Amino acid sequence: MTETAKRRPGPRIEEVARVAGVSKSTVSRVINDEQYVSARAREAVHAAIAQLGYSPNQAARALAGHRANAIALVVSEPSGRVLGDPFFAGVLRGVHSELAGRHVQLLLMMSQPTDTEDLVSYLSSGHVDGALLVSLHGEDPLVPMLAEIGLPVVSGGRPLGRTVPFVDADNFSGALEAARHLVSLGRKRIATVAGPKDMAVGADRLSGFKRGLSEAKMANDLVVHGDFTPEGGARAMERLLQKEPHLDAVFVAADIMALGAMQVLHAQGRRIPQDVAVVGFDDSVFAATATPPLTTIRQDVEELGRTMTWRLLAELAGEAGLPPSLLLPTSLIKRASA
Amino acid sequence: MTETAKRRPGPRIEEVARVAGVSKSTVSRVINDEQYVSARAREAVHAAIAQLGYSPNQAARALAGHRANAIALVVSEPSGRVLGDPFFAGVLRGVHSELAGRHVQLLLMMSQPTDTEDLVSYLSSGHVDGALLVSLHGEDPLVPMLAEIGLPVVSGGRPLGRTVPFVDADNFSGALEAARHLVSLGRKRIATVAGPKDMAVGADRLSGFKRGLSEAKMANDLVVHGDFTPEGGARAMERLLQKEPHLDAVFVAADIMALGAMQVLHAQGRRIPQDVAVVGFDDSVFAATATPPLTTIRQDVEELGRTMTWRLLAELAGEAGLPPSLLLPTSLIKRASA
DNA sequence: CGAGTCTGGGAGATCGCTCGCACAAATCCC
DNA sequence: GGGATTTGTGCGAGCGATCTCCCAGACTCG
């Protein structure tokens, strides 16, 4: 039909100024909530804005104000598989709820290894004011690259390598609590299916677990690493059972792996929790519906998203004395498996 | 430390022009891939861009060009629960892959009923060039509102009420194929757990199913509606079994409901597929891992996202003769349940 | 009571790009 | 061979905000 759709232009700031009987400058001050505006003027401007249905042009604001009023959520993972991940969904919800009301837009970007350069150049040239990183592998080249160009960044999950501000669940303490719980149950041979060695989350949960056993003067030699998939959890469990057929408890560093581990235990005729107690981590959607329902360490991923966003916006606002990193508390959720 | 982070400014278009030995205009033409640029000039500009690491300022482009170079993905659902939905994740992946390479950014927006006004006013004032809607309930007020302000919009899934361009799976044909399959298996009493009446997807799948049965001159009286949850599927199945204890096949209009329905069948001692054949819809992640693996109608949600995006961008580019709506093919995936 | 400070508000340059226009050079067509 | 067209290029006026001055009036104070 039409060659190009035409949008009705809407009023300019000038128009608002005229209606309110003030100057452009004053309207701008009101919009940006600056000081040195009389109550009269402020009200007049608000009234004019409401009357005209004025909405400031973001492009012009960004251009003149050297601010983009937008942040990027960078998902650093090739396949895009993360998007379906309940973890990611939770983070996204948190980010969104924290952003609500502020006039900051969220740009969703995915980074493939092939176009990292492009992404960095895009992010570096003022299109966004800062970035949230959700990176699933350990040592992502994106992290140092973004740090270098001086873009404010907050990582979700502790990144390995170069340190940037991050927010993470307190994986160490969570795993520690899991270990203590198993110890308190009177278990004698406690094993763990740990996460990948090259991810901070794997390392931190393993450290916490080991600490818990050493507190109780118990050996922590039963460690096998898995890859955060049910299959990986199953394979790891098989190896553990070979190493130590008499184990009576296992801490699995992710619910999703616990699913696989429990299948193996069932298959080998071990009763949960009578023969082998199982504790997971994450309190993901799978935990409550597993058979038996999984005792696990909860981390609040929505809160993670909220906190990341808060931290980034605070930095953008120039707030001083921000903690470089934040750990969110975890809690033990007791169900039937341990 | 610092009050406000400073970003290194990077080169302007003027700088690129100087290095390439041409004018700003020519650089602009090259960037926007316009005609009337000699090969020499084009190459010189590309070289200069690469050399300087130039990346055009989006805000300035948007301001001068009356284009935002961004589209919104509007998720119209209060709780944000959708985000974890594999359906949404697939769509998002598709959208992203279609956007790759084009210089169009994706803004993610969530619409609560409370701030619909704000959203519409935001979208209407030129911040984005168009919007993709993923709306989970039937008659969303957002649809007519956006249509009214003249913002190019493509809906994912056929919206009820006011017609806007949409892309959807061919739910009718898919359900028709499901019904035919059950008929071809020699089943005599075929029931359906349909979707909600107030959603197009529910209505369309039900129509297709009924058509399939009437083709075979069979009664289509065994219809109970569910709400696209496993529990809803379970309740619906119970009601169907009450109505007709002798049913020997059921078409469940969503895999997620089929899960609940199959639980009920198991619980009542019906063997699948010997006593009751079950066909689902979606081919979601649950289908293959169900017990028994679920025969289902596949819809390609990633393709849905891609097609929506393509349709929107084509409209923005002023392409003529675009189909108002598009239906994507579905296919029968035979597994063990039917 | 005049100098100094603080608060409120206006004028207008500026941000970095696109796009309309003018014009030159190359190509075409009879 | 000369006018009409097509192709290639540059100039400079905006786009719609912000933000840096600048100024006026109110208030303080020795």
Image: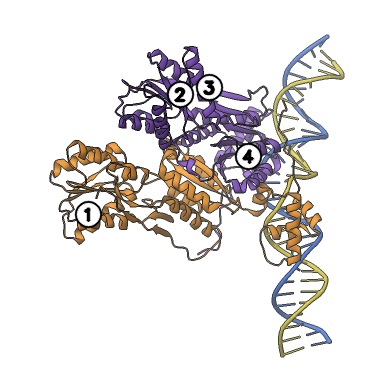
Chain colours: A orange, B purple, C blue, D yellow
Q: At label 2, which amino acid type do we have? A: Leu
Residue at the disc numbered 1: A182
Please state the horizontal and vertical placement of residue A94, each as a whole percent of the image: 48, 50
Residue type at mark 1?
A: Leu
Residue A163 visible (yes or no): no
Q: CA distance from mark 3 to mark 4?
A: 26 Å
In front: B232, or A9?
Answer: B232
- Taking the image as shown, residue A305 lies to the left or right of residue B162, namely left
Q: Return the x and y of residue A261 as percentages of the image width and height.
A: 24, 41
Residue B222, which numbered label? 2
Question: Do discs 2 and 1 share a chain?
Answer: no
For mark 3, name the chain.
B
Q: Position of residue B326 (x, y in %)?
A: 58, 24
Mark 2 or 4: in front is: 2
Q: Which is nearer the eye, A126 or A89?
A: A89
Chain under callout 1? A
Quarter location, residue D1:
top right
